[in-house]
Image (spheres, grey):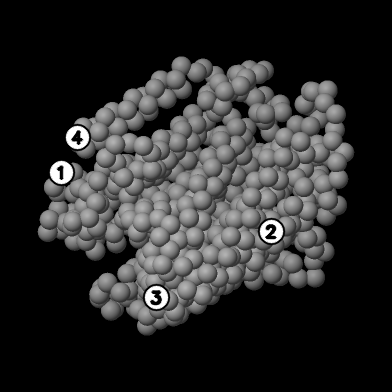
């Protein structure tokens, strides 16, 4: 019965993908669509069509990079909400060691899906949202180099998400994966008396494979676009810092994600066809090498574009250009190269050759240097600057603060003696979340608030934006610092219960998570209401960037869009947004 259900699901997903491809194939003149609001940066293309389809058909068939950016953004935010709700259930379960809100197996399911959701369904897509919308505008391109591939790359994500979450859906005899987001063998290969042989794990692996294909297609598109579609006045010397980070990130994706895909195929073969890559006489440690060869560049795949966002946004509210621009670019490239030489620092406790461990420790310590260069440049940019503490600026400053803590705690884990003590404790969880939530997500919020007028043509409520920032800054530090202290005390990660001596710090961490949850509710309310009813932007320079000569190309495009857009006859809301 289980095999029949698995075959039926596979056939259904195949028919869905064929249907999507057939529908997209019948659409003509994709690239001729004009952007929302009228006109690409380079004017209407030679194929020019005056209008897009209206309603749902527009979103299903669009190849306009801005529309696809909005689709990525909506998908990423939805995944962020789902992953956030998962972790809130986990933190409620951990509020008391005797709590029985959910079973231990369901806790493991939430833990697995939370990690995969936040990294693969939120982190990468939300970066793709900014990159799709703004990279062509920043470099003066009409659109992405391959608009159709751009659309297909996005439409691989929804079926990927459904496969990853399939175990939570009412499908008979399919349960959620409980392997942890790293999917270590032999557990993930279905060995033992547990339920890891269930089809839910196979579906999750197939979903991950789709998200990897999507990311790879997008990366190829970005590299080609930045190399071949730049405007005449955009050279390598004056290419903006965000595009540099997207270019570097795309290179990492092209080299890292195919290896993850290969490892997933090998694991699926072991699970379903009795091959011997990781079990049946194969090497379980091989999975860790393959996974982390992808996995640690993946950390920089996620953090480099947010670094680019901060490097772009922070100078706008410091009243001066980014200090040491060339060194920020060089440090970005250095991180990209070094990121492929540090993967085994995740494996210091596996018994690998001590000489290899030493070399990986050295590179892991060395990669902190270009990150420190960036931090120095951000702080120096603000030094003696004319700071304006807008919501985007506050999130940039919060990024720098959290990144410093996350980076310093990571340096300790790069040291073999320290790592052997702290490995697989909550210290690692605290360090990782300082980077992923405290830094990457903060930078993403800076970008969302900074470009909200471009997305929506309206302004958000500034007071609510600042309340959101302070709740998240306090909540993230309370939660993740408590996790680091739990790690010092020896609390292992991935446990649904714990010894009584850890109760106080777990309760502190849960209260911090609740503070962040409240901040998230305020953010969602602010964005939804402001998108629908916020005061319309009356000036194409809402942040007064012209005063310091800091306006970038996307704001020039926004000004042209406003000048050429037809009036809709609506009244401008004069409500106070302060």
Give the answer, above or below, for where 363 lies relative to 114: below
Q: Residue at 60% across / 19% down in the picture?
A: 53
Q: Nearer the viewer, mark 1 or mark 4?
A: 4
- Which sits earlier in the primary sequence, circle 3 or circle 4? 4
In the image, taking residue 505 as reference, residue 15 lies left or right, namely: left
Q: Residue 125: percent from the left, percent from the top? A: 51, 44
Q: Residues within 10 Å of mark 1 (few under 14, many from 20)?
A: few
In the image, taking residue 532 as reference, residue 204 lies left or right, namely: left
Q: Residues within 10 Å of mark 3 (few under 14, many from 20)?
A: few
Q: Nearer the viewer, mark 3 or mark 4?
A: 3
- Which sits earlier in the primary sequence, circle 3 or circle 1? 1
SS at circle 2: helix
Identify residue for label 4: 1
Q: Nearer the viewer, mark 4 or mark 2?
A: 4
Which disc, if any, is residue 469?
A: 2
Give the answer, above or below, for where 409 lies relative to 277: below
Which disc, if any, is residue 499?
A: 3
Identify residue for label 1: 273
The span from disc 3 to disc 4 (Cα, nearest Å) is 41 Å
Tell me whether circle 1 and circle 4 mark residues in contact (CB < 8 Å): no
The span from disc 4 to disc 2 (Cα, nearest Å) is 50 Å
Tell me whether circle 2 and circle 1 mark residues in contact (CB < 8 Å): no
Q: Nearer the viewer, mark 2 or mark 1?
A: 2
The span from disc 1 to disc 4 (Cα, nearest Å) is 18 Å
């Amino acid at each position: 019965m289980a095999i029949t259900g698995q075959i039926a699901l596979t056939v259904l997903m195949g028919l869905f993908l064929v249907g999507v491809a057939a529908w997209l194939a019948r659409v003509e003149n994709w690239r001729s669509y004009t952007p929302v609001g009228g006109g690409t940066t380079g004017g209407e293309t030679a194929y020019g069509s005056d209008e897009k389809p209206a309603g749902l058909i527009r979103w299903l068939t669009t190849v306009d990079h801005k529309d696809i950016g909005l689709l990525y953004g909506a998908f990423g935010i939805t995944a962020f909400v789902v992953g956030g709700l998962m972790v809130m259930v986990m933190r409620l379960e951990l509020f008391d060691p005797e709590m029985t809100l959910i079973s231990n197996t369901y806790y493991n399911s939430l833990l697995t899906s939370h990690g995969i959701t936040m990294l693969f369904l939120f982190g990468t897509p939300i970066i793709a949202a900014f990159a799709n919308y703004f990279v062509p505008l920043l470099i003066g391109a009409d659109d992405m180099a391959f608009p159709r591939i751009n659309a297909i790359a996005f439409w691989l994500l929804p079926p990927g998400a459904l496969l990853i979450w399939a175990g939570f859906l009412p499908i008979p005899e399919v349960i959620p994966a409980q392997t942890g987001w790293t999917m270590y063998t032999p557990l993930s290969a279905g060995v033992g008396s547990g339920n890891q042989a269930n089809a839910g794990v196979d579906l999750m692996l197939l979903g991950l494979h789709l998200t990897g294909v999507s990311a790879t297609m997008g990366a190829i598109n970005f590299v080609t676009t930045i190399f071949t579609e730049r405007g005449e006045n955009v050279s390598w010397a004056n290419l903006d810092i965000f595009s540099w980070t997207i270019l570097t990130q795309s290179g990492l994706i092209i080299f890292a994600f195919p290896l993850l895909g290969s490892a997933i195929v090998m694991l699926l073969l072991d699970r379903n066809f009795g091959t011997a890559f990781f079990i049946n006489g194969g090497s379980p440690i091989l999975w860790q090498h393959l996974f982390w060869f992808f996995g640690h560049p993946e950390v920089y795949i996620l953090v480099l574009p947010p670094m680019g966002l901060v490097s772009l946004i922070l100078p706008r509210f410091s009243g001066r250009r980014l200090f040491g621009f060339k060194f920020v670019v060089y440090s970005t490239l250095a991180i990209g190269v070094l990121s492929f030489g540090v993967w085994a620092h995740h494996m210091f406790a596996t018994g690998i050759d001590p000489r290899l461990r030493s070399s990986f420790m050295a590179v892991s310590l060395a990669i902190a240097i270009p990150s420190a260069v960036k931090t120095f440049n951000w702080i120096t940019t603000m030094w003696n600057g004319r700071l304006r503490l807008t919501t985007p600026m506050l999130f940039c400053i919060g990024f720098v603060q959290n990144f410093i803590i996350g980076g310093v705690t990571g340096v300790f884990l790069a040291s073999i003696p320290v790592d052997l003590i702290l490995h697989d404790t909550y210290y690692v969880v605290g360090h990782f979340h300082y980077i992923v939530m405290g830094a990457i997500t903060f930078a993403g919020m800076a970008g969302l608030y900074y470009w909200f007028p471009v997305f929506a043509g309206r302004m958000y409520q500034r007071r609510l934006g600042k309340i959101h920032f302070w709740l998240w800054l306090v909540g993230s530090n309370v939660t993740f610092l408590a996790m680091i202290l739990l790690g010092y005390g020896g609390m292992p990660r991935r446990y649904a219960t714990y010894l009584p001596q850890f109760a106080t710090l777990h309760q502190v961490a849960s209260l911090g998570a609740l503070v962040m949850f409240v901040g998230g509710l305020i953010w969602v309310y602010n964005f939804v209401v402001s998108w629908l009813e916020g005061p319309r932007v009356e000036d194409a320079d809402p942040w007064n960037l012209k005063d310091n000569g800091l306006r970038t190309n996307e704001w020039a495009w926004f000004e042209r869009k406003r000048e050429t857009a037809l009036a809709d006859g609506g009244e401008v809301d004069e409500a106070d947004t302060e």
